[in-house]
Amino acid sequence: MTTDYIEVLLRAIDPAISDASTVAASRQDEIWRDIVESLTQDSLPRTRRVRHPRRYWGVSALGTVIAAAVILATSVSAPTSALAATLKTAVVSDSGAAALAPLAAGQYYYQASAVSLVCSFAGTDLPTGQPLLTYVANGTMESWTGVGGSGKVVLTPSAVGADGSHFATPDDEARWIAMGKPFIPCALSGASNQLTGNPANANNQSNFGGDITTISGFGGFGLALTSSTQTSLLSATTNVNNLPSSVAAISNLLANGQINTDGSISSVPQACPILDGSSATSTGCTPSEELSVIEQLLQLPDASAKLGSVLYQVLESLPRASLVGTVTTLNGSVGTAVQVPQGSNETFQVVLNPTTGALLSCSEFSTISGVSTSVGSINYGLVQVAQGQGTTTGNATHS
């Protein structure tokens, strides 16, 4: 029996399942202002005491820290029975994904994923009291990892207005134009997006100072887009391919707090690398903390294949996890969405392939005035075997 058929049965039994709906355009400016204001409260990198420590690939000369994408949605949760059945089916279907095809000499695992992030920034002449400009930046994240886990990651933002990148609201774009089109730090620099020689970047007694100011607003995946392509080398110790292939073994390591957010493994149980404030023990992770660790690991190469089944098991054990229903991801894939609340106004959502159980995408939402808005997403591509570092063709090993 296919998972498609199972989902049809579940949806027939549970008519409460609802697909996402969009927010009225008239409220978008208000919602984005509220989101930007709330995100500025969490703008500095933090470590173990918080749920979302940031880990960034690449270094921006401007110190750019990026926040996340625009998908406006609300959802109605399905009963736990439907959620459990969906996740159990996905675990069985996806359980073999962690064991990727072995690599021969000179071969690499290659994966290209689409990322969509929100960049909130200010030109130097932003009037007093005006909200920051908010821009939705789309880009690609490519990775090559060889035997032992070493390799590289390349993050490439799109040009201004390309590949679906856009200002969050018409008001943001209109203010950007009125300010003389100041530099957008999360889009490729070029003739249409200059930092130097752009009169709009001149510091004319700005409240912010300098050429540009950016804020962080998204810490879930720890990604950063800047105005140029970034290439970062990975060491053999910081990759999920060093984790055991057994889903049960990975789950046990997570529960014991032994998997760090960079993919390295502690030889003994330890305090959870990410604490959510409710942990009563000094060793190991609660299910909620396990999810936070996985969320950080999902930025690493091949993590969608390695951690899919583990993630589903963690989700099933979390309170208030719910089945959203069928959704379409940023790159056009159709899957089944599951979400779980995190914190007072955050929600983590995953989208699963209804047939194979593969992890298609992960997103984090912020809820303001009852409206949930995606503030970051990674949409995973196939894991392939490439014949060299830098090549993009090969045989698919996971879908």
Image (spheres, rainbow, N blue to C red):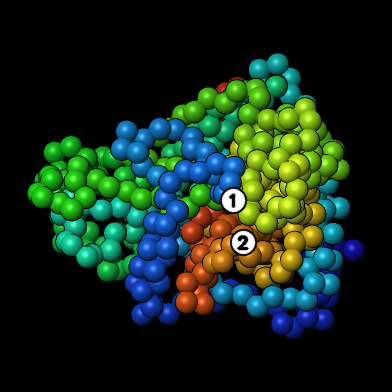
Q: Amino acid at mark 2?
A: Gln
User: Which disc is residue 342 wearing?
Assistant: 2
Secondary structure type for disc 1: loop
Q: Give the mark, 2 or 1, whose residue is nearer the N terminus.
A: 1
Q: Residue at x 13, y 38 (%)?
A: 197
Q: Is residue 100 left or right of residue 178?
A: right
The residue nearer to you, when weighing 49 against 265, is 49
Q: Does 91 sit above or below residue 393?
A: below
Q: Quadrant of residue 111?
A: top right
Q: Residue at x 81, y 35 (%)?
A: 245
The residue nearer to you, when weighing 238 against 164, is 238
Q: Amino acid at mark 1?
A: Arg
Q: Position of residue 258 (x, y in %)?
A: 74, 36
Q: Does 41 sit above or below residue 239?
A: below
Q: Position of residue 228 (x, y in %)?
A: 36, 36
Decide: few, some or many residues near mark 2? Use Cα within 10 Å; few <14, some 14-19, many ≥20: some
Secondary structure type for disc 2: strand
Q: Quadrant of residue 120?
A: bottom left
Q: CA distance from mark 2 to mark 1?
A: 9 Å
Q: Position of residue 347 (x, y in %)?
A: 59, 63
Can see residue 229?
yes
Q: Position of residue 266 (x, y in %)?
A: 73, 30
Q: Which residue is mark 1?
A: 51
Tell me, yes or no, whether the two marked residues, 2 and 1, touch with CB atoms within 8 Å.
yes
